[in-house]
Every structure is written in structure tokens, then in C-alpha cells.
Image (cartoon, grey):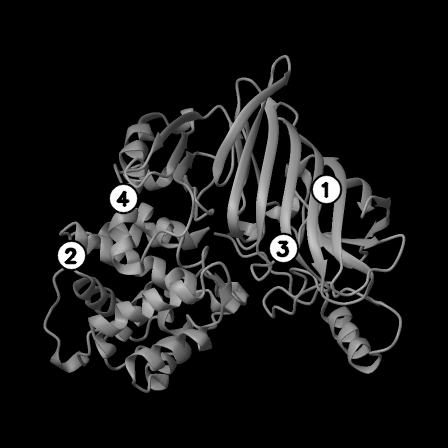
Amino acid sequence: MRVRTRAGIGLAATGLATVMLSTTATAAPAHGAPGVGDPYYPGAGNGGYDVAHYDIRLTYQPEIDLLSGTTTILATTTQELSRFNLDFGLGVESVRVNNAPARFRTSGKDPSELIVTPARPLAANQFVAVTVRYSGTPSEVEIDGYTAWKRTADGGLAVDEPQSAEWWYPSNDHPTDKATFDVSVEVPDDSAAISNGTLVRKTKQRAGWTRWNWRSTQPQATYLTFLAVGDFEVSQSTTPSGLPMINAYDPALGANLYAAKASIERTPEVVEALEQYFGPYPFEAQGGVASTGLGFALENQTRSVYSDRFFRSGSNTSVVAHENAHQWFGDSVSLGRWSDIWLNEGFATYAEFLWSEDQGEGTAAELARYMYDSVPADDDFWQVLPGDPGAENQFDAAVYDRGAMAVHALRTTVGDEAFFTILRTWLEQRKGGDARIPEFVALAERVSGQELDELFQTWLFTKGKPEIGPNGETVRTMTAPVQPESYAQIKANQQHLHEH
């Protein structure tokens, strides 16, 4: 996972827009803010509207890495708007707002901000249909010195975090504005175009080309919407619970192919195990994609994408547990600000502990304790705060490992019954939306009936190694721990996940 820092972009404009709106309530329609106010990425997302649905219809030519087509955005304004922004990096040919041609330009301060001025100002609470026609070479587009589109020998991957949408479709690119999706991509017959949700149909409209049509019916964050094009081996089946499962494997996996299959094909089993702790799986499909075109794994909604490096030592169901836990923690319930990353990574790592326990390879308590004891108190690891790590440390090892220890410390403090009630209640109440760490703390206190401020302050927001371990033991009372069988694999996974 990669951090793409956008610090400073849009701060002045956002502040000016706030002042204007607060002092001119009866004035002319205002400009939509160029960001949603996320301190880690001030230019991420946009103000003034809320998206309900994206209809993405594209053609991709792998040989020359050319992407072209249209995206139609269905939204509702949240204020009167004279203009609004979209997050996008490719070349735009035309924009229409409610079928009327609109003026558009790229911001001089941030090339990923597409500024759209409709023919007529938009009223508050107005339905809006925005259609953008565009084309470009995604792998040649740099935003803040970074390219999220990964060109491969036989195609490309739109997979990354915290942003990837801007390289293939215009959007309101922040997890707080989730939407449903139709993704339709035409590629050469010898290629596959894999995305989220259900494969509705495959159609042929011209010789040598096939259009893959995908539908996601549950609210989905923009960075979790992905596209993988290549000469994939695609398998389709049905899970025991009746959901469609689609997996895709890069032929370049070579000797790692069978290890990848032995892991990803067990996705329904992993999901069933996690359902015992988290409640019903929240989406309409399952699956996974294994590729050599990236160096990490990402929890794209309904269909995670895995680097081949996770399978170089054999099968690895632990990473499958991690990414599928994100279907609950991160996908169904998304973070409200990127500083809340612990709500994603701490719980996904803890799911690896739970899966280890399910497989008889070490209990969650044994793993939490061994992890705690393995890092000396003077290690820089303990200087990163999982509850607010900063954009530069957003995917640091501490967010994963200390984050998981924090989850177990909560379990130790409140007991199993209250702990799992907290998790299931959180996921049920927040399903399809987004949330913040303080809201989780408030729920944990309400369900457990305990004051937990000190616990969370110690584990998430205080530098230094906590004096009391995640199992409630002090360092002085600990005996030498024994390494659980699953520990080496979990640590290797965390290294791959955060080093990118």
C-alpha cells in the first residue's frame, strides 16, 4: 500500500470557500470546495455534492496502454453550486451536466482537480447527471509525482491506496462519499477485464473485442473500485452460501500459481470463519485476483488483489484472512478520515490472529503477546501512533502490529462476550457508511459499561511501549514466550503490506 501525500494542496481554497459560505448565506451560488477537509490529503474528494452511482464505460487497448470512454456520475447537490470539482488525471474531451455542455478546466494548483462550470448554476438538493468523455495513457499520468496505474506486459492494473480512481475515472475521491457502480470495459478477446461485484454479462459488439460488464450494488469507496486487465485465467463458481465467486490468476505467476490457487480458492472457508466473529458477510460476491504487476495486496470490495510475492513460499491463507476481514473493516465500514486507518488495518491484522486460532496455529493471545515481547522498548516502532500515524506513516508496521495488539488489549479488558458484541454491533450499525475512531471508542464503552479512554489513549495515541501488555501482563511478570506457528507468516505478510 502506498501513501500519496497531497499536503498543502487545496488548503487555502478550502478555507476561503468555508468563509464565503458562512458569511454569504443569501449570496449567489458558491464554488464547490476542492477537498473534503481530510488533513492527510487536503485535495482528496470535493465539496458540494454527494454521489449515488457511477456508470463507467470504457475501451482499453493493452498494446498501447490507451484508455478511452465515458463516465456518468449521478449525484445530488448539497448546496447551491456555480461550479464543482472532480478528481481526475486523464485528458478530458467533453463534460455535460444534465445533458447540457459544460465548461471545464484543470486547476493550475493541482492537475488532478477537474473544475466543471455548468451552463446554469445548480440549486441545492438538485439531482445532477454528469457525463465526462475522456481518453489517455494512464501509466504516463503523474499526480504528486506518483502513478497509481500499473502497466503490465499484457495489460494494466488500477489498484492502489489511498487513491487510484483518478487514473481511470472521474470521481469524488474520498471514502466518505461511497456509491454503487456499473463498470463496463471492452478489451481484446484474449484479455480479461476484472472488476468488483458481479459479472453481469460478457458481450461482443465488434470482431476481436469483448466487453466485460460488472455491477456493485452495495455502497463502495472509490479507492476500492479496481480494474485489472490482462491474460488472466478466470474461474467462476458459487460459494456454499450461494454467492458468485470469481477468481483470476496471472499466467506470469509461474511456479507460484498453485500456491496462489491453494490460498485464494479457500476464500469462502475463510469468510465463513470470520463470520463467526464479525457477523454476516456484507457483500454480494467473493473472489480474488493474483498478479505479478504489483508488490502488495489490496482489499478491493468483493475481490481483493494479491501480489505474487505472498505465495513465493507456498500457500498463504493468512493474507486471504487479512484482506477479507477488510470487507467488514474498511469496505463495509470505511474510515471517516485517513487518520482513522487503525479501524482498517488493526482489525484486519487481528483477523489473521483469529484465523490462526481457527487453524490451530497459535491463539490470538499467544500472537499478541509474542508480538509485544518481540519489539524492544527503545525501538522506533513504538514511536508511531496507530490512532493518528501521520500521512508519512499511514502504513507503518506499527499501524498493523501495534494496532492488532490494541484490539487484543480491548478484548482482554472487556472480555470475550462484550468484545465480540462490540465488533458485531459496530459493523451492523455502520454498514455501508463511514466512521471515526472516537465513535468506536464510544460504542465500546457503551456496550462494555467500562471507561476505556485510558486504554485507547495508551495503545493508540501515546508514544512508547505500554507497560502492560495486550494480555494484561506486566513485563516483570512475563515468562519467555514461545513463537506461535503462524507468527512468521503473519510478520511476512505485514512486511509486504506496509513496505510498499
Which element is circle 3 on?
loop
Q: Which mark is residue 317?
A: 4
The residue type indicated by label 3 comes to Asp
Residue identified by numbered label 3: 173
- The residue shown at (25%, 74%) is 418
Whether residue 320 sits left or right of residue 138 in the image: it is left
- The residue shown at (31%, 59%) is 278
Give the distance between the C-alpha atoms of the residues marked 4 and 2, in whole angstroms.
14 Å
Which element is circle 1 on?
loop
Q: Which mark is residue 362?
A: 2
- The residue shown at (43%, 53%) is 499
> Disc 4 or disc 3, which is closer to the eye?
3
Neighbour class for label 4 at 10 Å: few (<14), some, many (≥20)? Answer: many
The residue lying furthest to the left in this view is: 479
Give the distance between the C-alpha atoms of the residues marked 3 and 1, in whole angstroms.
15 Å
Give the distance between the C-alpha atoms of the residues marked 1 and 4, in whole angstroms.
37 Å
Disc on the earlier residue, 1 or 4: 1
Disc on the earlier residue, 4 or 2: 4
